[in-house]
Amino acid sequence: MPSVNETFESARRPATPGMDVAREWLEADGLGGFASGTPGLVRTRRYHALLLAAAKPPVERYVLVNGLEVWVQTPTGRWALSAHRYGGGAGVVGGVMHPDGNTRITSFTHEPWPTWIFALPDGTRVRYELVVPRGSPVVCLRWSLPEPGANVTLRVRPLISGRDYHALHRENGNFAAEACVHGQGAGGGAVEWRPYHDATPHIWASHSGVYQPGLVWYRNFWYAEEAARGMEACEDLASPGEIVMPLNGAAYLALGATTPGAPEIPSEAAGYVNGVFDRERDRRAGLGTGLARAADAYLVKRGEGRTIVAGYPWFTDWGRDTFIALRGLCLATGRLEEAGKIVLEWAGAVDQGMLPNRFADSGQTPEFNAADASLWFVVAAQEWLTLARASARDKARVQDAILAIVRGYTAGTRFGIRREADGLLHAGAQGQQLTWMDAKIGDWVVTPRAGKPVELQALWINALRIAGEIDRAFVAAARQAQESFEKRFWNASAGCLFDVVDSEDVDVPGRAMNVEFMDDPRLRPNQLFAIGGLPYQVLSGEKAARVVQVCEKELWTPMGPRTLGPSEPNYRARYAGGPLERDGAYHQGTAWPWLAGAFIEAWVRVKGGTPQAKREAREKFFEPLMANVSRLGLGHLAEVAEGDAPHAPGGCPFQAWSVGEAIRLDRVVLA
């Protein structure tokens, strides 16, 4: 049986890396910023950039340097080491590739950082490396000759926008091309650009050459992934000048942003860049291999504490995602100090028994629109307290937050979230999406699930049992909720659990099956959390085994369980198209890798949790899941995949809870 690391390292790699624009690499700075792109050099998303920095970590992100135009001059000719796709003019969509640097790529690897090897027609080979150091809004670039060469010159033009990372940039008269030169000599120099004066962070560049000013606009870059998502796909970028560097041994360029955590502009590029590469090599070696190293990308700074970015390139930190992912990213990997900072950062945000699903950033009101985020906090916080040596003060703070959540839900809080007479938890309000199935298009909530959703009850019973260990007053409430769950959720005709009981949805297919209680019989994976994925198992025995059997047969894919059974009305086999089509399919059949955690743990539990059951689950389910690492985001698991074969990955290429649950499976559930 192959090990996890062997499976990870054997992920499919294309024979022609220069043509690989379907997969993506990521370098995160630990502040919310990142660099990303494709092995084939061509940017396919508006989010692909070399320098994308968070002005207020981890939010207020700006794309500062989108990419580079790179040419190398040898005694026999001038050759491109960059490639871009352009719109191609009227009536032509993404029709022009220029220049042709991607055709010269002979190899690419993303470990320990993105590295390309180019072969030029005259036999010259050039190595290009890129690294983002932890804790700084900086990217360091190094070009070198694997074999000795002479009279080789590198010409680099930064392509700049200075825009919000969700937006696109167009040629305009307000762009400021003037550079502030901080020094220039035989060993290089440094320059600073202020694209829109004080409206965005400034950009600095430390280099091992000579800066030559001269504004050039590059128009109509075409982003294929944006077009495929039904979004605007064209952009113009400005290049304020060119950096000319000798490449007799190596050439160096560091790009940075004037944001919190930024170092002063280095006066000598070679020493600074080499130092960053050396420090990052040592730091990354200490993280381990495979997904354990990938986990590092999601742990970022927030204020004086820490948080978890839900996914790259477009998500920030969300409450629900944070605490689902934390169990694998931090607790399973032994990063207990960072886990504590995250738990304590969020513990102070409880309001009316709820944690926000999003913080109040940039003057916005915090979003308390998740019924489950607070309960996931209770689970993750208690697991951290069990593993860590928390101080008496920190322990009391976390336990107070746990009790405040359970008491708030018991008394009743926003959006109809309340403990009802049967001890179960109700959640629902008109126009609100309160569970993890939270797709919403305008006023249309795709999967409202108002009433008593099954996974919410599993979380609620777990939270009551955890609170009961702190305050015995909750023991009886946990017992009552458990008894009510066993009575109310079993769907005997289907041999599994209802997805929602006392449903308030107006379009539940099959409602006539149980008119008295209006129970939703649609086959969804949420029932798995009654058996696996949480500390306390809510459903056991023969009924649990039947649930797992049904879910394995109807929902399991190598990319995780589907969100709706294929035979159900409204099942969507494909996750593609514009926002309406994609959001409409998001929880209507699309598979989610993070749900593999609950499914595989449930499967092992109903098999008795034996070593043999764990070995069988690893071979049958976990290894096929791990074979999909790097299918979209190199070294990571994607957010979603299509429900039908071949289960093409989609959504965010780099998703925290997908990676976190895979780590938790490997190191905890299947250990």
Image: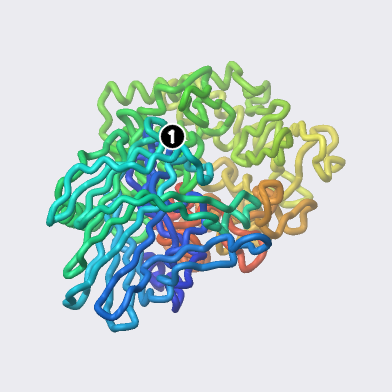
Please, what is the three-letter code of the amino acid marked with disc 1?
Glu
Residue placed most toward the observer, 125 or 555: 125
Quarter of the figure with residue 299 = top left
**Residue 97 in picture, x, y percent from top left:** 51, 68
Query: Quadrant of the image for the N terminus?
Result: bottom left
Q: Position of residue 170 (x, y in %)?
A: 53, 45
- The color scheme shown is rainbow
Q: Is residue 628 among the parts visible in the rendering?
A: no
Residue 78 is at least partly visible in this image: yes
Does 664 sit above or below residue 317? below
Residue at screen point 33% across, 78% down: 119
Q: Nearer the viewer, residue 218 or 624?
A: 218
Mark 1 nearby-residue class (10 Å; few <14, some 14–19, many ≥20): some
Q: Which residue is mark 1?
A: 60
As drawn, the residue found furthest toward the bottom would be: 122
Up-down relation of residue 516 to residue 352 (above or below) = below
Q: Residue at x 34, y 82 (%)?
A: 121
| Residue 276 spot, x, y in % from top left | 20, 52
Secondary element at image label 1: strand
